[in-house]
Image (cartoon, helix red, strand yellow):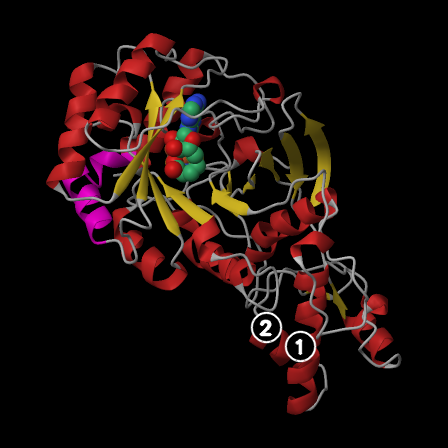
Amino acid sequence: MTQTDLMPIPGAFDPVPTTRPGLVDGVTPRADGKIDLLGLPRPRIGELFAGAGLDTKAAKLRSRQVFHWIYHRGVTDFGAMTDIAKTMRPWLEARFVIGRPEVVTAQHSEDGTRKWLLSTADGHEFEMVFIPDADRGTLCVSSQVGCTLNCRFCHTGTMRLVRNLTPGEIVGQVMLARDALGEWPKGAMNGLDVEESEGDYSSDGRLLTNIVMMGMGEPLYNFDAVRDALKIVMDGEGLALSKRRITLSTSGVVPMMARAGEEIGVNLAVSLHATNKATRDEIVPINRKYGLEELLQACADYPGASNARRITFEYVMLKDKNDSDDDARELVRLIKQYKLPAKVNLIPFNPWPGAAYECSDPERIKRFAQIVFDAGISAPVRTPRGRDIDAACGQLKTAAHKMSRAELDRLAEEKQAALG
Ligand code: SAH
Ligand code: SF4
């Protein structure tokens, strides 16, 4: 790791995380002067090919072919791109690369959950988690190294350094997961018009079918990169994941929510966690800036939300903090008042060293879920996954130097002051 402790928490009003230093027009600088194509939109790849000397028509064709090899086939070597002329391949190799984030460690939980600690080329660590289920496989993707916000129950919020991940580093997580799961098509490697059926894909019998932006960071504080990365993930000529299988989770960055719906169009999850101002101000401090009414109105206005595509409200169960019958009834009342097509995900609090809260008792969680369910709102209790490898919700935090309670409190104050 680089010197993360020395970097200040930036921003006076909305906390502004640092961008990748040296980034020019989406291109990350490299020591060898080559350009990493991972994370660049297809037209931009075409521009770069044209800038390197191809005529416009050739640049367009080659960019289409290369894009397909990168995202449909998972190829990282231009030499393997068999529908590109043999003489052209070294030309590409001399100028471009197709990168991946570096894997620092990979862990496997006894319940099948997998967690990877990854590193950016400039030495910042972040995590991704894969959660296999009977009918789906979900990749939990990070949008930032750390988080500028400081939800009091979240371990990631105690990280000091915050750097936005680039689109390449975001989409790179999906690529790495596919690499690790052995999920690239194994059909004939002869180019654009080969189609495979689902049966041609293999993993441990499970597929990466869903993506949730619920790893480290607040995706709506890294809007452009998250949008650009998800557009690539959804591109029909590449990874081709349906927007219905992608969920973006926000702690409530209200001014960016409409744009998220319009420009990305994926499912929305909102980290609600409390139903009154005092409690939400305490546990999700961004509430002091964008309050509950504004947040719920933004949910009601979210483009694309409907009964078929509900908004998920995440609600972490904290003992004696937000878990009473009255809290459950208030949650129902708010959802009805704003006429929200909603489901509620109840998340048992995952403890971490130094956390100021405890998880609610199972009986309490059951009762809370029942009240919401009886009001006609789906309210599953999420089973914690990968606890043995610290992969469960809100446990993601690298460089785990242990902070004392006093240090944690001081950090929380600093971050809250930055919220303005
Ligand atoms: N920053 C975004 C997405 C990442 S967090 C957000 O806050 O929505 C994904 C979910 O895990 C959020 O709902 C978050 O509040 C929840 N979470 C964080 N810490 C947790 C913990 N210790 N136990 C259970 N859930 C937690
Ligand atoms: Fe950041 Fe989300 Fe954790 Fe809050 S819950 S500190 S917004 S990652």
Residue under pointer 1: 63
Residue 208: x and y in percent read 61, 45
Q: Amino acid at mark 2?
A: Arg
Residue 134: x and y in percent read 58, 34
Q: Main secondary structure of the magenta part?
A: helix
Q: CA distance from mark 2 to mark 1?
A: 6 Å
Residue under pointer 2: 42
Q: Amino acid at mark 1?
A: Ser
**Do labels 2 and 1 touch, CB within 8 Å?**
yes
Q: Residues within 10 Å of mark 1 (few under 14, many from 20)?
A: many
The residue at 27%/49% (across/down) is 307
Residue 247: x and y in percent read 43, 46
Asked whether the viewer can see residue 101, the reply is no
Residue 71: x and y in percent read 66, 62
Residue placed most toward the observer, 367 or 219: 367
Residue placed most toward the observer, 10 or 90: 90
Report the quarter where the N terminus lies.
top right
Q: Quadrant of residue 344?
A: top left
If you read the primary sequence from the N terminus, does the residue marked by circle 2 or circle 1 appear first? 2
> As drawn, is 259 to the left or to the right of 108?
left
Q: Label 2: state its secondary structure.
A: helix
Q: In the rendered view, would you say 230 is above or below 163? A: below
**Magenta stretch, residue numbers:** 286-301
Q: Residue furthest left?
A: 337
